[in-house]
Amino acid sequence: MKSLFYYLIFPGFLFSASIGLFAGWVDRKITARIQWRRGPPWHQNFTDILKLLGKEVIVPQGAKTTFLLSPYLGLLSLALVAKFLGESILFPLQGFAGDLIVVLYLLTIPAIAMVVGASASGNPLASVGASREMKLVLAYELPFILSVIAVIIKSGGAIQLGEILNHQINFGSNIASASGLLAFFTAIFCMQAKLGFVPFDASEAEQEIMAGVLIEYSGLPLAIFKLTKAIMLYVMPLFMIVLFLGKDLNPFFLIGKYIAILIIIILLKNTNPRLRIDQALRFFWGAPALLAIIAIALALFGL
Amino acid sequence: MDLKTRALTKSIWVFHVSAGSCNNCDIEILDCFTPRFDVERFGIQLVGSVRHADALLITGAMNRKAVPRMKKIYAQAPKPCVVVAVGQCALSQHMFRDSYNVGEPLDKILPVDLYVPGCPPKPEAIIAGIVKLVNKIRNKK
């Protein structure tokens, strides 16, 4: 009963979705201000979701059952990640061994859900988007996991979120060391790609392949995909905080760090053009992967 | 006014259809999204896929090739969905009325909710039209 509450309400689904939607508004507002516009009111993203719930759901002819199931897959797994991360911050010692690895797996599921949903829709543009999404997953997972490994080595081989936090509380944040800084730098780019933001939004390129993977979705499934994106915008910065900035985690500092990472994401988004998918692949397997490997080497030497 | 209508009128996602226009109205539609007019203040967004659309902005004189495609696009849009005719061509086919390549005018083919006249209409006119449409939808339900 208690874990159901954690999953559905407080650190889990409802809380993370509200924070994520609000963060989505912050993103839109700052983007608007950068472009010298006014920007939407604060409740805009909530209104969008509410509106989508009231729209007709169209299932294209020839779509498989996975077309309607896959959005839930992504949402449920991300809500679980939100629960794990929230619990590891609230009660660092209650987690189970290896929850870091579970979180890593669960964080890939939304991308897979999108690929499955897009392929099930049978739309040619969606399949272009799906193939791009797959390539992007291949591209960013390597440096992302390498940078997480650097953190694991840095925290003395701990594969539990609570232990990593404890290590940072005792010995200082990971970002304060050379290896941690390099790994953080890599992870920021991977986070951008995981969120599907510019410069790595080739799979959803609105202007060229018309929303790509989401092209056939309308109404409720589209709302669920938007919610998944929103929770991603809450979960990924929080994951960064747990891995790299875990020294002071009282609510004030936590919110400050979250906003700082959010602003990094938004500025990256607004100052870069979209990369072609081959450029993104070459980018991720080049400099960030190398940086992450250097970070692992440095961590092995204890730097 | 119920919550659904309220949410719908606060977040209108617009899909832009060109049915053989001269590209002038299309540029004026894009002007609405620029910093000077910024319709994102009202939650209006341009979307790439017709499945996400709440409003179809149709420009152009509806030539014979465009008519079946226009019907298809309207059928693809999830309801409730409004149709907005932007520009004199979409309203009355303008100078192309008796031309060999245009068929029926737009409102004989689709149920049009709003007409924005002008060649091309100013962005102010488009925004004023959208506001009138929003008020109409809100008062109807």
Image (cartoon, rainbow, N blue to C red):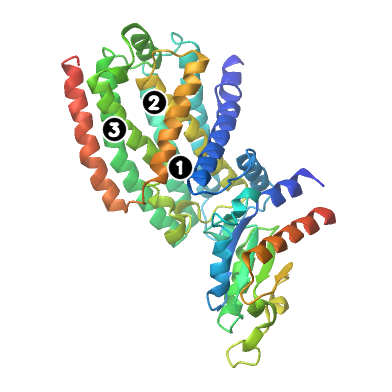
Going from the N terminus, do you reach mark 3 or mark 1 first?
Answer: 1
| Residue A197 shows in this picture | no
* Image coords of residue A55 (percent x, y): 67, 51
Which numbered circle lies on residue A186?
Answer: 3
Subunit that carries the residue with mark 3: A
* Image coords of residue A207 (percent x, y): 45, 59
* Image coords of residue A76 (percent x, y): 52, 32
Q: Is residue A105 above or below residue A124?
A: above
- Mark 2 = which residue? A240
Which numbered circle lies on residue A254?
Answer: none
- Mark 1 = which residue? A113
* Image coords of residue A292 (percent x, y): 23, 30
Q: Amino acid at mark 2?
A: Met
Q: CA distance from mark 2 to mark 3?
A: 11 Å
Residue A291 lies left or right of residue A117; in this view the side is: left
Q: Residues within 10 Å of mark 1 (few under 14, many from 20)?
A: many
Going from the N terminus, do you reach mark 2 or mark 3 first?
Answer: 3
Depth check: give the residue in front, A261 or A105.
Answer: A261
